Amino acid sequence: MWRLKISEGGSPLLRSGNGFLGRAVWEYDPNAGTPEERAEVERLRCDFTRNRFQRKESQDLLMRMQFAKQNGVEANVSTINLEDNDITEGAILTSLRKALNQYAKLQAQDGHWPGDYSGIMFIMPLLIFSLHVTGTLNVILSSEHRREICRYIYNHQNEDGGWSTQVLTKSTMFGSCLNYATLRLLGEISDGKNDALARGRAWILSHGSATAAPQWAKIWLSVIGAYDWSGNNAIIPELWMAPHFLPFHPARFWSFARMVYMPMAYLYGKKFVGPITQTILEIREELYNIPYNEVDWNRARDSCAKEDLKYTRSPVQHIVWTCLNKFVEPMLNVWPFNKLRAISLSNLMKHIYYEDEATYHIGLCPINKALNMICCWVENPNSDAFRAHLPRIYDYLWLSEDGMKAQVYDGCQSWETSFIVQAIFSTNLIDEFGSTLKKAHEFLKSSQVLHDLPSHQNYYRDRSKGSWTLSTADNGWSVPDCTTEIIQALLYLSKVSADIVGLPIKEERLHDAIDCLLSYANDDGTFSSSESKRTASWTEVLNPSESFRNIVVDYLHVECTSSAMQCFILFNELYPQDCAEEIKRCIKKAAIFIENQQKNGSWYGTWGVCFTYGAFFAIKGLVAAGRTYDNSIHVRNGCNFLISKQLSGGGWGESYLSSENEDYVHSGSPHAVSTAWAMLALIYSGQTERDPEPLYRSTKQLIKMQMETGDFPQQEHVGCFNSSLYFNYPNYRNLFPIWALGEFRCRLLGMKK
């Protein structure tokens, strides 16, 4: 059986700055488990496969099995009788205790809550491709790994035979080509007997073949030798040598785009192609409607299937890429200009090595990690720089009843733990769950980034001392809104006796965090997702990806700005003399920005689905800044918007299509997380005191949705990435309903006093 290992190393090639805190890795033990446990695992797998077209989201049942065995039996809590229409404070308290007793058992021994952070279907193929071209596929992945990866890919094949870019959506050329090639590289045979592969290939060929794949798919297929590099638009390595002041210098791009296109530029500059094995030759024949050597690569360069086209090429891009492809790239490959190409590639490798060292070879995300790994192998296949990448592959793999998938990051440990702490505080059951809070407290304190990176400005990096990442300290990439939410959690914990929750964070480290956070503020008091805004919005016209929107610029976000504003307000209450004027200016500007971003009554949420998510952050932030339902039309309009979207049963259910359409789209059924977000926004605005009836109805809906275990159901993914990609935050299903029920109960109690 498989078992989840927490905060462990295990390889002499692994390094860590804090003892691998937060690292979660699945390991197969052939001797583990009783016959009954093995039979139960198989039953869960079969159930998922049987219902895979009706229910695409897995429920993390394998992890829950392990934790149930480790952490004891379920708590004996009262059942909740909702036969009448009344929601009492006692019923809410019973629901909360049931949820928190279960939730405490899902906490890992290091203090965080692990879980399935997945949903994007092209990440596993990228990891498999990187292992294939470096000749390490069978070294890193056991037969059990390969079996579970294949299970996942087959389970998420759509009824039409194709694969999507992500679990939720329809088939795309991106998802289909990469997952088909992955199955072939994992040893699956296209011999007429494998119906799934046959249907996958039929979908690809009937939708234009791999020549119609979007840019990222073309690049990855080129790397493994299943697409010719001449069919790609140029990614000029020399661009990184341009003057830094230019608005289109890559140093000014959003961190994710910068870190992905850097190794892409290196591989393009090298025109690197992995080993052409018999399987690759077969893939070449299977992905195209005509023989591979007859493909018109010049024509293929500008082809993209309509299913993949999210970002249509602009006229400016047509001009730019025509010039690059016809004139610049050919010129840079002949003497003496090829000397500049060699210098540029060497410069890129300096940055790639720096990124790998700064993140302990985890990378910013799995995409740049896989690309960097290939680049290091191309430079020297026997180097420590390459070999150190290999054991970190496991940091991105996760196992559920639907198989083994790749996570969208190396986890969201710090981000979610900060919210869970705040959710428990909302219940006012701190004494009962003090030991849970104490472990979470220690995890957060120990996950802080304590030092700036050496020479960070030379490598386009900002200050990091005092910040937190989305995942673990080893990841190293500071995230402003993660830092703000963690500071808030730590400030709440600092108000409670150390006997219950442990010693508070040292004031020096707290001040480092605030100083770092202020360094990320834009001039107008706003905050972006990872760094302060570095370039003008018009540079988005250079977005070459075709499949993803808004990836060139690190835009200003309502959620990030609201989190920072709330953090500053809470900090200023406890430390009124520290950075007071700077903080007050930031709060004032941030509130105005949030008000100005209101659209049709609500706020567009970039990092969650979507208007309920935006409303939660915006209203909570505005209320913290002194706005109320009575004195703010923005708060009032936000509340009216949410009330207008409440379903007849009392809940809210918002579809991921809201993010794509930029207009609210009902999902048709209540969603526990959407309901919690809307409830919290209304509660913070004073809805309980104004008219609690909508909240009574939504509370009843949440309690009815609660499962016998105390968990809330895993429903459609609500995580969102740049309005294009949707994935699962593993703990949202529980933490936000707990938070909403806790806040409502406490408000009801307050009204009785």
Image: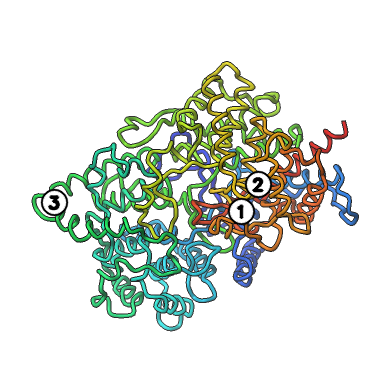
Q: Which mark is residue 63?
A: 1
Q: Secondary structure at mark 3?
A: helix
Q: Which residue is mark 2?
A: 106
**First along the sequence among labels 1 and 3:** 1
Camera sees residue 443 = no
* Pointer 1 or 2: first along the chain: 1
Q: Residue at x 44, y 51 (%)?
A: 550
Name the residue type under label 3. Asn
Does residue 571 show up?
yes
Q: Position of residue 310 (x, y in %)?
A: 44, 61
Who comes first in sequence, dot 2 or dot 3? 2
Local crowd size for mark 1, using a 10 Å CA cut-off: few (<14), some (14–19), many (≥20): many
- Asked whether 459 or 708 is in front, the reply is 459
Which residue is at the front of the view, 624 or 591?
591
Vertical side of 315 occupied by 496: above or below: above
Q: Split into 4 quadrants, where in the image is the C terminus?
A: top right
Image vertical order of residue 380 relative to residue 747, above or below: below
Task: Please name the amino acid that badge 2 sits on.
Answer: Leu
Q: Is residue 588 left or right of residue 171?
A: right
Taking the view exactly as shown, the residue that stands out farthest to the right is 84
Mark 3: few, some, or many residues within 10 Å (few <14, many ≥20)? some
Marks 1 and 2: CB-CB under 8 Å?
yes
The residue nearer to you, when weighing 345 against 565, is: 565
Circle 2 sits in a helix, a strand or a loop, which is it?
loop
Residue, far left: 335
Real-space Cα separation, disc 2 to disc 3, in angstroms: 56 Å
On the rendered structure, is 599 left or right of 556?
Answer: right
Determine the image quadrant of residue 567: top right
Q: Which residue was labeled with disc 3?
A: 338
